[in-house]
Image: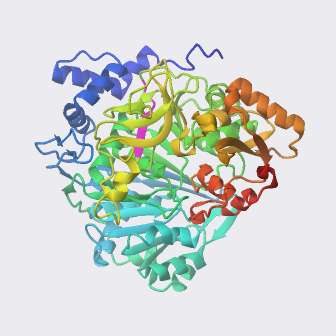
């Protein structure tokens, strides 16, 4: 595949049928415009945010009263208010369907299969709403859930949102302290947990953890049956009941949707917390809904009845993004467990059976499929698949190539990037432009995304900070327990005055796309030159001998030297020849400045629950500094592998 040719180009027919094209034509008609492509549309959406966001509201059919004002104090990022007169209910917008059609399809590895109609989903939401009210839960109260990615979790969130309660969730693989580090900060009125879950074909018991967390939180607990004995877990947990007992007194009826302000809190999401106690990021109902509708309808082309899948847990913001697909009338395809249980074909089997239209996953998963020697393009019928999205970390150029050579030739591949901070994307795909190898297609509509240098000047053709210079609806409402907003301002606005600095090291491309080179706080500075870690990973992780890599800068001799840790493939030893081959690959594929001073083999690499490697935590360990919140990690024991290494003393 030649780098000077796009990997995918939308057909004229596909463009003409896309919702974003219809949206553009509507804008042209309503406002007397002559927008003719994505770049035109994006420029207008940023210049005319009032017209753009009000058209998104109307085009996507938001249920609620919009009010007269669209944007107040729009010139101030921290002071701006979108739709200050509007009222709506998030859950009402996510329950457009009725009848026996599929609202949710569920797979729990190869252990559990289920299918929920819109009527079945609405019935459970109705019963849970009544039960929550009977518990005295109402507007502004928090409900915390340690749950698998299963239909009951979606129903509980919708019931919470229907009455104006605030939802917060994590996955059941979090340790006890990790759960308390999150939920202990927000004072929930109810704790929801599963009885057990499956991972890699093994039953994972959480009964003792549920009891311990419930005791520490000191609130009633709701135990949902999944893979274990819900009655036994409930009986061993003070103040607990099973889901069946909790909703038994209530009959399913019409759901009451409390109408709330656009900025009313909907979700509390948590930062990864690998360098301290997780930040509690509060997102609004209106901002989340409008931003997700824009991304899913316009950027992803999602239509009613289509199958939407994202491989995620309830501890990652992609779960919150996924469930919003209901608002477009899509069918959610949920999966819980390991994507390699019973083998690496399980998600592609699911995609073939359910006819996924959108398949969302992580860059690490795509790389694992490639390294596993799988070729779904040959083994599976993926004819329904229109869009594949990738996030969690930058997708390497080789990952792009593999999707087209190994998964599907005529699919749109959208590498996307944003995060928990905005519960959405700053940069992502769109159906109107080509896909170029290694590049994110472009910025999100309505988002004034740019790349700035250290002096706060926009740059092209060089790396810098990813910023957003104008306010947008899905900015956090606040951080919990941050009454004067100091933590919030410090997180995003300390670097540049009244400009959101996201913490990504980024670069515009000649095609108007973007490349994310890694997190800014993990960039390397040998000799004072900033290097993105992703540039090194893109080279070394393509070598069959290397399963995974992690790179840090070690303070050394009044400078910083690059240290590369590698987890090798099974049966491979780090010989002098392999070290030389790794360095040569990095020198020729990236630059001499990227070549590490040391290459060190390790048995494992620490990562968060959502699969992101934790360069900062490893950097702290290497320098003998404590890592404050190891509960945020999926494998905290791996940190010990980086402590006191003899190789780093010379």
Q: Measuring 40% from the left and 51% from the top, which residue is drawn there? A: 491
Please tell me which residue lies in front, 83 or 107. Answer: 83
Residue drawn at x 58%, y 35% is: 528
Task: Inspect this view and state whether residue 540 appears.
Answer: yes
Please check the rendered image and state whether residue 646 is part of the magenta-colored stretch, yes or no.
no
- Screen quadrant of the N terminus: top right
Q: How many marks?
A: 0
Q: Where 405 sits versus 291, above or below? A: above
Q: Position of residue 452 (x, y in %)?
A: 42, 32
Whether residue 139 sits left or right of residue 378 in the image: it is left
Q: Is residue 473 left or right of residue 539?
A: left
Looking at the image, which residue sits at the far left? 68
Residue at point 26%, 70% (across, down): 138
- Which range is magenta? 424-431
Residue 86 appears left or right of 164:
left
Q: Is residue 597 above or below residue 38?
A: below
> Magenta segment, principal secondary structure?
strand
Observer-nearest residue: 598 or 350? 598
Residue 400 appears at what percent x and percent y?
Answer: 61, 28
The residue closer to the viewer here, 82 or 193, is: 82
For the point 40% across and 33% down, which residue is it?
A: 455
Looking at the picture, tell me which residue is in the foreground, 75 or 21. 75
Tell me the quarter of the picture where residue 75 sits.
top left
Quarter of image, res 428: top left
Is residue 303 shown to the viewer in this render?
Answer: no
- Tell me which colouring the rendered structure shows: rainbow
Q: Residue furthest front?
A: 558
Question: Picture coordinates of residue 21 (x, y %)?
Answer: 33, 23
Q: Position of residue 475 (x, y in %)?
A: 32, 47
């Amino acid at each position: 595949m030649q780098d000077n040719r796009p990997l995918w180009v939308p057909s004229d027919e596909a463009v003409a049928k896309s919702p974003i094209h219809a949206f553009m034509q509507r804008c042209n008609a309503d406002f007397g415009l002559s927008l003719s492509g994505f770049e035109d549309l994006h420029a207008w959406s940023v210049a005319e945010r009032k017209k753009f966001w009000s058209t998104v509201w109307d085009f996507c059919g938001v249920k609620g009263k919009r009010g007269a004002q669209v944007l107040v104090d729009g010139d101030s990022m921290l002071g701006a208010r979108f739709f200050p007169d509007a009222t709506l209910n998030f859950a009402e917008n996510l329950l457009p369907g009725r009848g026996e059609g599929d609202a949710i399809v569920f797979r729990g590895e190869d252990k559990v299969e289920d299918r929920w109609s819109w009527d079945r989903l609405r019935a459970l939401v109705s019963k849970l709403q009544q039960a929550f009210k009977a518990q005295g839960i109402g507007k502004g109260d928090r409900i915390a859930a340690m749950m698998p990615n299963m239909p009951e979790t979606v129903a509980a969130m919708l019931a919470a949102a229907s009455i104006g309660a605030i939802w917060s969730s994590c996955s059941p693989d979090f340790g006890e302290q990790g759960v308390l580090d999150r939920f202990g900060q927000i004072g929930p009125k109810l704790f929801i947990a599963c009885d057990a879950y499956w991972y890699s074909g093994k039953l994972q018991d959480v009964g003792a953890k549920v009891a311990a967390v419930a005791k520490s939180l000191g609130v009633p607990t709701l135990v949902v049956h999944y893979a274990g004995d819900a009655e036994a877990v409930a009986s061993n947990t003070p103040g607990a009941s099973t889901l069946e007992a909790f909703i038994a007194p209530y009959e399913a009826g019409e759901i009451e949707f409390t109408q709330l302000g656009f900025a009313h809190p909907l979700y509390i999401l948590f930062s990864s917390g690998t360098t301290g106690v997780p930040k509690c990021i509060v997102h609004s109902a209106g901002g989340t809904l409008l931003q997700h509708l824009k991304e899913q309808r316009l950027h992803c082309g999602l239509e009613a009845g289509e199958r939407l899948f994202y491989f995620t847990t309830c501890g990652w913001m992609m779960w919150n993004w996924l469930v919003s697909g209901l608002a477009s009338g899509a069918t959610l395809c949920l999966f819980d467990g390991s994507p390699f249980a019973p083998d690496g074909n399980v998600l592609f089997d699911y995609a073939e059976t359910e006819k996924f239209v959108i398949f969302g996953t992580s860059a690490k998963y795509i790389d694992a499929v490639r390294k596993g020697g799988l070729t779904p393009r040959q083994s599976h019928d993926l004819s329904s698949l229109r869009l594949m999205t990738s996030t969690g970390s930058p997708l390497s150029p080789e990952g792009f190539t593999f999707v087209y050579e190994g998964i599907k030739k005529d699919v749109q591949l959208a590498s996307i990037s944003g995060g928990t901070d905005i519960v959405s994307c700053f940069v992502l795909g769109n159906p109107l432009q080509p896909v170029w190898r290694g590049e994110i297609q472009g910025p999100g509509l309505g988002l004034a995304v740019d790349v700035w240098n250290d002096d706060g000047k926009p740059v092209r053709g060089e790396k810098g900070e990813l910023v957003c210079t104008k306010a947008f609806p899905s900015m956090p409402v606040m951080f919990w327990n941050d009454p004067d907003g100091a933590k919030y301002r410090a997180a995003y606005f300390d670097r540049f005055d009244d400009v959101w600095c996201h913490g990504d090291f980024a670069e515009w491309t000649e095609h108007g796309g973007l490349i994310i080179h890694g997190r800014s706080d993990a960039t390397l500075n040998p000799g004072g030159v900033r290097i993105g870690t992703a540039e090194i990973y893109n080279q070394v992780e393509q070598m069959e001998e290397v399963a995974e890599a992690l790179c840090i800068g070690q303070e050394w001799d009044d400078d910083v030297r690059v240290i590369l840790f590698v987890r090798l493939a099974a049966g491979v030893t780090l010989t002098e020849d392999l070290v030389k081959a790794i360095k040569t690959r990095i020198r020729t594929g990236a630059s001499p400045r990227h070549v590490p001073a040391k290459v060190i083999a390790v048995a494992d690499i620490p990562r968060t629950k959502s699969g992101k490697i934790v360069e900062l935590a490893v950097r702290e360990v290497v320098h003998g500094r404590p890592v404050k919140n190891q509960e945020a990690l999926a494998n905290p024991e791996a940190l010990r592998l980086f402590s006191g290494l003899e190789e780093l003393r010379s």
